[in-house]
Amino acid sequence: MMFLARISAGLLLWAFGFSLLYALHGFGCEGGWHEIRIAGGMLFRWVMVSVWVLLCIAGLAVIWWIRSVPAGFERRLGFASALVGCAATVVTGAPVTITSACV
Amino acid sequence: MNALNRHRALTTIWGSPQGWRGTATSVNHSDIGRRFIVAAFAFFAIGGVLAMLMRAQLATPGSAFVGPEIYNQLFTMHGSIMMFLFAIPMFEGLALYLLPKMLGSRDMAFPRLSAYGWWCYLFGGTILIVSLALGVAPDSGWFMYTPLSSKAYTPGINADVWLLGITFVEISAVAAAIEITVSILKVRAPGMRLDRMPLLAWYLLVTALMMIAAFPPLILASMLLEVERAFGWPFFDPDRGGSPLLWQHLFWLFGHPEVYIIFLPAAGVVSTVLPVMARTRILGYGWIVAALLALAFLSFGLWVHHMFTTGIPHMALGFFSAASALVAVPTALQIFAWLGTLWNGRPELKLPMLYLLGFFLIFVLGGLTGVMLAMVPFDWQAHDTYFVVAHLHYVLIGGFVFPMLAGAYYWLPHFTGRARVPKLGEAAFWLIFVGFNVTFFLMHLTGLLGMPRRIYTYPEEMGWTWLNLLSSVGSFAMAFGFALFAIDVALQIFMSRRSRRNPWGGSTLEWAMPIPASAYNFASQPHIEDRDPLATDPELGLRLARGEGYLAEARHGRRETMAVDITTGAVDHVVVLPGNTRLPIITAAVTGSFFLCLLFGFYWLALVPVAGVIALGWRWAWTLGWQEDLGRVSIRPGETALTHRETAGAPGWWGSVFLLVSDATLLGSLLFGYAFLWVVASNWPPPELIGGGIFIGLVAALSALAGTALTRRATSASKAGSTASASRAASAAMGAQAVVIAALMSVGITELPVPGSHAYAAICWTLLLYAAVHALIALLCAAFIRARVVSGHVSGTRTLEASVAQLFGDYAGAATLIVLLCVLAPAVLS
Ligand code: HEM
Ligand SMILES: [Cu+2]
């Protein structure tokens, strides 16, 4: 189990983050967060962007953490999937910054 | 013992009886794998005949050959057969047959499960084919969109056949997935570290893991739709708070990964055959594995691209189209690894290579039309036209059928022990290749001229006549090609000359044995030191036959094979596998009668087979195990190991873990449905919410916790060797689970609106039933442990069963708590 977790940690984080963003998007639009204005922007945008940024940071943290795995195939694989997971979080989450909200 | 005597002794242990008895009882992976392959090919032929009928109908405008009712059944059954009864089972068969041989072991981890999966597949497929013969086959398209497939628009039995028949077949897919996963992780030859596994094993591992996560959404969706059709619970009915889009989400949550589930095993075949044909080694092993992992995950983030036109908000579309674009990267990496391998090597144009070249050409074209369809404005034009039919066949036939044909020619000598007849195979290739391109290339044009898919006829004035006629001619040429392939195979089986061992000079372990393979694969299991064991030691097969490996001794009539540590491949323990038994076929027949009861609407009668499955499941587990310790057994001169029941982390434990993972994705999909309806469906919030029930809910939650704790207590007591307290704790756990079931049901009965009134009530009821079923399973597990502690099968050293029971107990507790939280939330918050 630990092995599977290590070699897919970064990708698991992406899967979690992706689902989280999609779920927040649904709840946020339903709850009317895009109609609440806060600190010069809409609440919806603030929430989405900050969650996305946190997820990206978590992705970096996974990359950092993988370095402590003993060297070998497992670490190389874990490292690759941590990189991919982090990049995927950046790319698939990027729409939170510019696309219009809830239309 | 000399090689011949060892062969005889091992064959007695591993072989199957002759005749019908052998057919009904064999659990040997080679038998089951061969059957899967043959049956899948038969279904391919049936699906192909349906395609020919469609092409005959469409060859001329205004044709009166078949009418719309029949035509709808034709394309629905063609699509469903090809996806569910051909592609997936074909790969399962290949995996079952090859995996143990490539991993240097003697069988899969759960032989009886493979046999059960096989019979479920056969019976489920038969139900579908019989419905076709009776003219009541499914007719709502292979993705069965609601509301077309709901009661109002498909009042007959047609849709039920699909929902129940396919679900029945899916059981076998999930069984195979768990089987493949655990076999690859645990049941390998010693020394085979993960990075020494043949690449095909990686492909199959990733595919199987994807299946474990991808099939539950489809199984759930089918169950919900069937319940809606049978009892009127309105999951998909917008008037009562349901949503047809929920079906689409659940279907494509399965459907997109399904595309990769079909493609990856074929890609694995390419990665295995190509280097041998090019007389070199595969380039970028580690890169390919990393790309596979990335593909596996990313492919779960794409499903909404099948729903781009359903009015989903822009930001969500953005997530999914970004993910769709990303997934091209690992695919491209994979293709470059193949090209690099070809470049590095000295390719020979043997027949499998010919098919691989066909694969490259066709698959790349299919990829290009895929990119075209991914452009939204283009998709608006081409959506639901023959352009899409052309695209999907370029991908499916190019990406699955061609590699599988390459694999067929590559491994046939292994199955038959014979060489092929010259020339016939080449003729078949050219007929298939040219026929394919004539048929489907022209469909791009028909599609661009505006011909919609799924129409049974068209008028002359549309100007599609010539293209359609040529497509039909091409499809018949292709059909002749496949027939020739079948003849070629038959000739090879029955009349050809014998082949030498390892005819292609492959370096993987399946060639380290005489062909055709014996029932036990290896007379003794190798110790693996690198990725190409046969390249480093061409004499390996002979040495193993002489008994110079692990488990060379045939003893006590036990089927023994080695299990290893997942990562390092170090010796872990010896697995003692069950022998031939009728249990799988009987259990599958009883499972099948459950589905038949539902199909014909005998809902109360369906409880009989449910009881039957429980009883058989009990027996299934009961017939294994021992009442005394086997202790350490010798595995090689001077080396010993424990057997699987006396160690932690036996295959059975891992199998339960993956089963529960699959189960958890089912629960996750259900919760997704709950949240989705709440947020997206119209007519929400529901007119009537849960009334209260916090107190009974608390009772259920506390008993669930008690049930879990008591099962744990029973486990630890049995491990400590105190039989009396273990059996007392197990009895108490049973009581606690019974209370859970009663409390859950009374929450539903007293507090929830009736399930037919609104999708809210329907889905809350479904959640409660889910938890109750799991409490029942935990109850049965506790009862089983109690009985086994008393009978002396479970002890301080023989801990496997207790730890499995604990897993199910823990899961039931967690599931009940989650369900209660979600169902009671409105009552708590209001
Ligand atoms: C043997 C050669 C084959 C021919 C001539 C053929 C022909 C066709 C035709 C004409 C249709 C469109 C029917 C319509 O929309 O009216 C179709 C649909 C389809 N085919 Fe094939 N096919 C072949 C093989 C395959 C294979 C190997 C697969 C999958 C592995 C496959 C999967 C499908 C699917 C999923 C559909 C969509 C069904 C639907 O619309 O519900 N086909 N095929
Ligand atoms: Cu897709």
Image: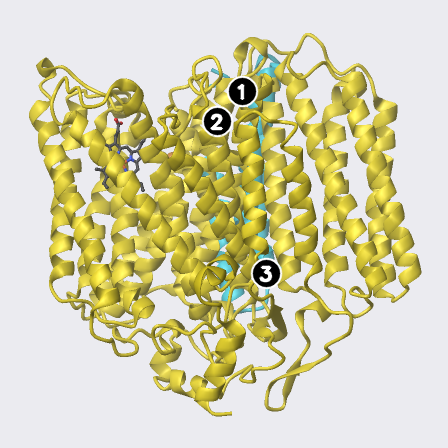
Label 3 sits on residue: A3
Q: Which colour denotes chain A?
A: cyan
The one nearer the camera, B730 or B808, is B730
Whether residue B675 can be seen here: yes
Q: How many marks?
A: 3
The x, y position of residue A100, in whole percent, is: 46, 19
Q: Which colour denotes chain B?
A: yellow
> Which secondary structure lies at badge 3?
helix
Label 2 sits on residue: B160
Q: Is residue B224 left or right of B506 when viewed as pictured?
A: right
Question: Which amino acid, mark 3?
Answer: Phe
Which quadrant holds the C terminus of chain B?
A: top right
Question: Which amino acid, mark 1?
Answer: Arg
Which residue shows up at 51% across the image and 74% down it?
Answer: B189
Q: Are marks 1 and 2 on the same chain?
A: yes
Question: How many angstroms separate mark 1 from mark 2 (CA)?
Answer: 8 Å
Label 1 sits on residue: B229
Q: Is residue B422 left or right of B741 when viewed as pictured?
A: left
The x, y position of residue B451, in whole percent, is: 19, 21
Does mark 3 have its CB less than 8 Å from ligand 2? no
